[in-house]
Amino acid sequence: MQQQSGSKRLKHSRYISGFDGIRTIAVIGVIVYHLLPYSLKGGYLGVPIFFVVSGYLITDLLLQEYEQNGSIDIWAFYGRRMKRLYPALVTMVLTTAAYITLFQRSLFVNLKSIIWTNLLYVYNWWEIGHGQSYFDRFNGESPFTHLWSLSIEGQFYLFWPLILIALLYVFHQRKTIFYLVIGVAVLSAIAMAVLYDPANTNRVYYGTDTRMFAILLGVGLAFMWPATKLKTELPDQARRALNITGAVSLILIVILFFKLSGETSFTYRGGMFIFTLLSTVLVATVAHPAGVMNQVLTNRLFDWVGKRSYGIYLYQFPIMIFYEARVTNIAAHPVLNALIETILILVVSDLSYRYLESPTRHYHYHELPQLVKNCFSRQSQYGWKRWVAIPAVMVTLIALYGAAAAPNHLPAKDNALQNHIQRNQKTVTKDNEAVLSKQKTAQKKAAKPKTAASKYAKVKLTSKQRSVAKDYDLTKTQLLTAKNMPVTAIGDSVMVDVSTDLRQVFPNTYVMAKVGRQVWQAPSEIHGLEAKGALSQNVLINLGTNGPMTTQQINDVIHAIGPKRHIFWVTTHVPTRNWETQTNTTIHEASKRFSNVTVIDWHGLSADHKSWFYNDNVHPNPTGNRYFTALVAKHMTD
């Protein structure tokens, strides 16, 4: 994610301006994906592009140094990398930690571990066991999540020069090392495919071993495509082939930005590797001085963004998450809010580039004690700039206090919603088997909505049934119809939240709901339910809270359930996320394509009733649960 710089010891080197264009494309993909994930579902693939560029440039510079000087100054390399990367990283981590400590305690958990793992560049491994899915955009999204990739790059910078020296010592031919590196890259891609678990992508998404193939493809390219040894002139036919190859790779990369979702198995079983190969081809064509791709990707805008791409990537998540926590109705104006967030990211990144990253890149840190002394001297040459030290010290102290005070989990008394969901999760899991055994009997007693009124006309309600009917504003016919209706409820934390109320009205409901579940995970769950006989004729679905929903994804869910079952799909109430409108539009459109899909418009009913929800304005509170359940019951029994 950073602008690379060569060693001053190199006599011959090339600055390839087109790489700023590649970085710009990559960072635009990542930013748009995070701001408007439904618009560019493959934008997360900007990260493998960064990896390829890093692998290529770092290796090419190290090989140049080795050839020109007969050795590689590892300590000088480490010094350059630290100066380039560490000041902004430390600033972002400590400032974000201080903000969380003061203003957003909901993100306070594990702050100490998050800080030290980031500063030691091992955060990606910590996230595998402790972090949420990269694609779960709702459940306490962390402002540090994106730093997993910087940890992988940090590990690469630490170990690769040592490994490279060893390889150059053992093998004297570049071709041999090239084959070895590419072989390891292929093994890394195979590891991603083998270790991929659709229920939990953290292991393959964050793991150094499963993501290293992108860096290694760039490394391999450096051995066979050295920037300073490429011919400046090529025969016309070869030049045309080079240009066509570069243009095609760029076009395919853009297409995959729109098509390759991070929530499909193909992505991890070959798709991401194919994308990375295309990125490697693009890097190669831009690096070649005889081609046109370098000029195509060189302009003032790309130069400006490319040089600030490290800061843009670094500061994006804190700005987005803190902004969206304050502007609670993001869904009302998703594009406008995305534009505001983008401007904030660019402004902060530019300030960081001008006043932090550029000055510290060339600073001699052995002069730091003298700098501190000069800052507090009456005759200080730094003038007003010295007063920056005061807020910097304060931010650092607050961040350190936060790290020391942060718990490893939220105290139970501080999170009523979490406690409610945890209790419901245990209850529904415990009672599901009993419900399953009763559903067959209930199916025989069930009446179709059209004939229910006559069937239940003479039935007298018990006092408990009358109480339930009053609580949920149901007629006798609606209540008795629901009582004998077998239902399979599939959903996320909202479904878990409302499950107790649902079973008050629909006692024969098998609940398959889980915190953090997204729509792309549902088909495999549905097949599992069908295999065990737990998929009833009436399927209630509430998905869309945790991420955007594409037409293909909702089609997959509907096809998995089958045309003979009646599907009741509840619209999403998630005003704090920009995909609310898109997700609900997708649900409504699906009901027009499939005759067995009925929309239950929870969003429409609840839009102006903030008092029905917990503080997150997404999960219904006890009042909201009654209205939710009443709405579902009326649609399913009429």
Image (tube, grey):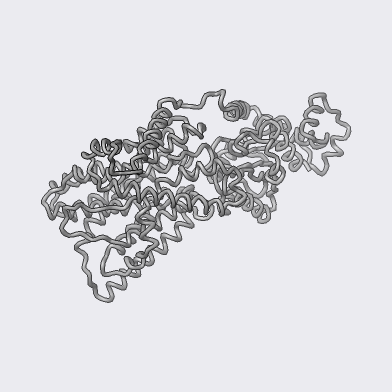
Locate residue 54 relative to residue 507 in the image: left or right: left
Q: Position of residue 227 (x, y in %)?
A: 23, 61
Q: Position of residue 344 (x, y in %)?
A: 47, 50
Q: Is residue 550 above or below residue 510?
A: below
Q: Is residue 575 above or below residue 502?
A: below
Residue nearest the observer in this picture, 530 or 596: 596
Q: Position of residue 478 (x, y in %)?
A: 80, 37
Q: Is residue 578 above or below residue 281?
A: above
Q: Position of residue 485 (x, y in %)?
A: 73, 36
Locate residue 524 relative to residue 563 in the image: left or right: left
Q: Is residue 375 above or below residue 274?
A: above
Query: What residue is shown at x 49% (from left), y 47% (from top)?
Result: 263
Q: Can residue 441 be seen in the rendering of this structure?
A: yes
Residue nearest the observer in this picture, 180 or 292: 292
Query: What residue occupies the far right of the structure in this picture?
Result: 458
Q: Which picture quadrant has residue 402? A: top left
Q: Can residue 178 be seen in the rendering of this structure?
A: no
Q: Which picture quadrant has residue 444? A: top right
Query: What residue is shown at x 63% (from left), y 49% (from top)?
Result: 584
Query: What residue occupies the far bottom of the structure in this picture?
Result: 236
